[in-house]
Image (cartoon, rainbow, N blue to C red):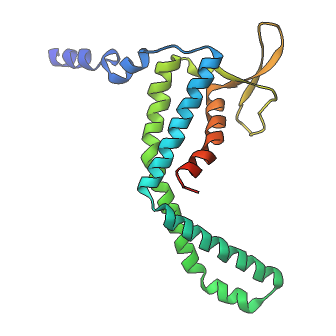
Amino acid sequence: MLINYMIYCYWKPQNSFVWRISNISIMVTEMPLVTLVISVLSIIVVFGSGITRRLLSNVEETKRIQKEISAYNKELRGSIMKKDKVLEAKLKKRQPHIKQMQAKVAKDSIRPTFAFLVPLLIMWTLILPAILGSDWLSIRAAISPIPLNFIPFITVTQESTNEQGIVVNTMSVFGWYILSSFAFQASISKMLKLT
């Protein structure tokens, strides 16, 4: 009985590392600062993801294979459009090899994704609550001039009224993170020579 009580006292949630980290918060809740913090976090995540991809996969070989697959698909589509049965049959013989190359590219791209998934989850479960507070899902990160709810089942912007009584489209932290990640993805990929 005493041992059970000691284990409970030691392992109760208040003593856990996750609980301690999540209760140390800087409490950034004002919109310009939240926008900047989320943008910086998205740059860090995109940069880290790119470096992980560079380290765990052979980028040059992947580019070469993708170029070869693209040329094969273009040639196959051309032969189908021209109704050239001889060329189409010749290209269909190469199809198992092309499928094998596509599987290799998929395997090479999955490895860095899984390697970077854990740090990303740590960011969303530990770092964001520490910076923005435990109710970070309700914090608005940006104002959009237009509603961005064109993705089905995902509410990116919500209409709200500001101090002057004007209806504005506010963007959630998650919506701003997704938008800023897409914005920085191409330039960071070019910088790391991934594309």
Q: Answer yes or no: is residue 184 visible.
A: yes
Q: Position of residue 181 (x, y in %)?
A: 61, 39
Mark count: 0
Q: Residue sitting at 81 percent across and 86 percent down?
A: 83
Looking at the image, residue 98 sits to the left or right of residue 54; the answer is right
Q: Answer yes or no: is residue 139 visible.
A: no
Please determine whether, in this image, residue 183 is positioned above or below residue 39: below
Q: Nearer the viewer, residue 187 or 55?
A: 187
Q: Residue furthest left?
A: 2
Q: Residue sitting at 47 percent across and 35 percent down?
A: 121
Q: Residue sitting at 53 percent across and 72 percent down?
A: 101
Q: Quadrant of the N terminus?
A: top left
Q: Position of residue 16 (x, y in %)?
A: 32, 21
Please determine whether, in this image, residue 143 is positioned above or below residue 98: above
Q: Quadrant of the C terminus?
A: bottom right
Looking at the image, residue 129 sits to the left or right of residue 157; the answer is left
**In the figure, residue 165 lies in which quadrant?**
top right
**In the figure, residue 66 lies in which quadrant?**
bottom right
Q: Position of residue 110 (x, y in %)?
A: 49, 55
Q: Nearer the viewer, residue 46 or 134?
A: 46
Please determine whether, in this image, residue 180 is positioned above or below residue 191: above
Q: Residue furthest bottom?
A: 86
